Amino acid sequence: MSEKLEKYIAKKKLAVSDLGRNIRVNRVCYLFLLPYAVLFITFYVLPMITSIYFSFTNYNILEKPDFIGARNYLNLFLEDDVFTTAVKNTFLIAIITGPVGYIMAFIFAWLINELPKWIRTLVVFFFYAPSISGNAYFVFKILFNDDQNGWLNRFLANLGITNAPIMFLTNPQIGMKVIIPIILWMSLGTGFLSFVAGLKGIDKAQYEAGYIDGIQNRWQELWFITLPNMKPMLLFGAVMSITTAFGVCDVTMQLAGYPSTDYYARTIVTHLFDYGFTRFEMGYASAIATVLFLTMILCNKLIQKLLNRVGH
């Protein structure tokens, strides 16, 4: 056994020993955490492990799972052209609504931080309203409806600009240009609210001390004081932004239809929904879920590394 391996094993044994000692000393605290731990393991950890197992099987709910190795993953990446389209659409949505929505939420929160309370309350409500309702896309469906009853089509027809309804939601050339801004607006709420709370929680004395130490403008104030103090909120906002961006499904299904024309609005979660709840091919759906899960973990790790550099 190599010296490095022995040191690694010794380090792990010491960590387990320290954990056991910590549990014995703080056993009352761990007893209070036990109900949450049981629920978390039951409804999060075990389903995740089960999904990973089913991803290596041919399983349709009615019959016993048949282990097929990595065939689902090979079919997913090598033969499923619709999945390739779904990946492209998901990353397009994630690239625009993820970083752009994240940055916009922080900038708006930063800009309104010094506004009077009643104005700030109205702005916060405007950004958080889609997160409260959850079904705000129905308004946009009526607005961009493809027939003459759509508000925008009726408005354009009344002005004499168009002679026939514009296919805003079924035309692949137009659809994503309409849907992505809607998703972007609906994704701002939670991160925006956490940023507003984080900005209000920063001690004003730090800004005074910063200007005494040589900070000369608002940008230096932002980089050296505001952002370092908001790392927990920044991380929370990043996780929510990534989760929202990669989890897009309901909005595209309701606006573009299910399935959408030429799969132009197909996302990974929509693909998962198709195989899991329409075709009941749970093994294949579990493979899609596992790929999505790993992708989100990698993105979260990347965001954490980037945020650790803030203020350094």
Image (cartoon, grey):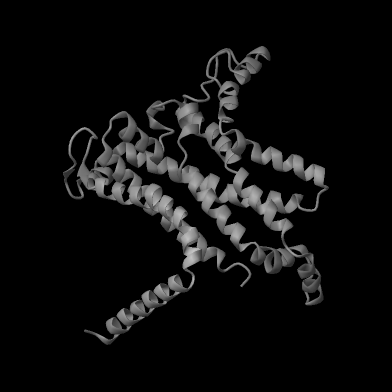
Relative side of 151 to 62, left or right: right
Q: Is residue 306 above or below residue 74?
A: below
Q: Image check: 296 left or right of 164? A: left
Residue 143 on image: x %, y %: 60, 23
User: Relative to 203, is 285 on the left or the right?
Assistant: left
Residue 195 spot, x, y in % from top left: 66, 53
- Residue at the bottom extreme of this rendering: 3
Q: Nearer the viewer, residue 33 or 140?
A: 33
Q: Quadrant of the N terminus?
A: bottom left
Looking at the image, which residue is at 67% across and 12% down?
158
Quarter that holds the C terminus:
bottom right
Image coordinates for residue 174, horizontal then vertical, percent: 51, 29
Query: Which residue is found at the position 69% from the left and 53% from the top?
Result: 197
**137 vs 294: above or below:** above
User: Total of numbered circles in the picture?
Assistant: 0
Look at 50% across and 48% down and name the residue there.
Answer: 95
Q: Quadrant of residue 18?
A: bottom left
- The outermost residue toward the front is 28
In the image: residue 52, left or right of residue 18? left
Q: Quadrant of residue 19?
A: bottom left
Q: In the image as oriented, which residue stretches furthest toward the right?
A: 116
Where is residue 75? Give x, y as percent: 23, 43
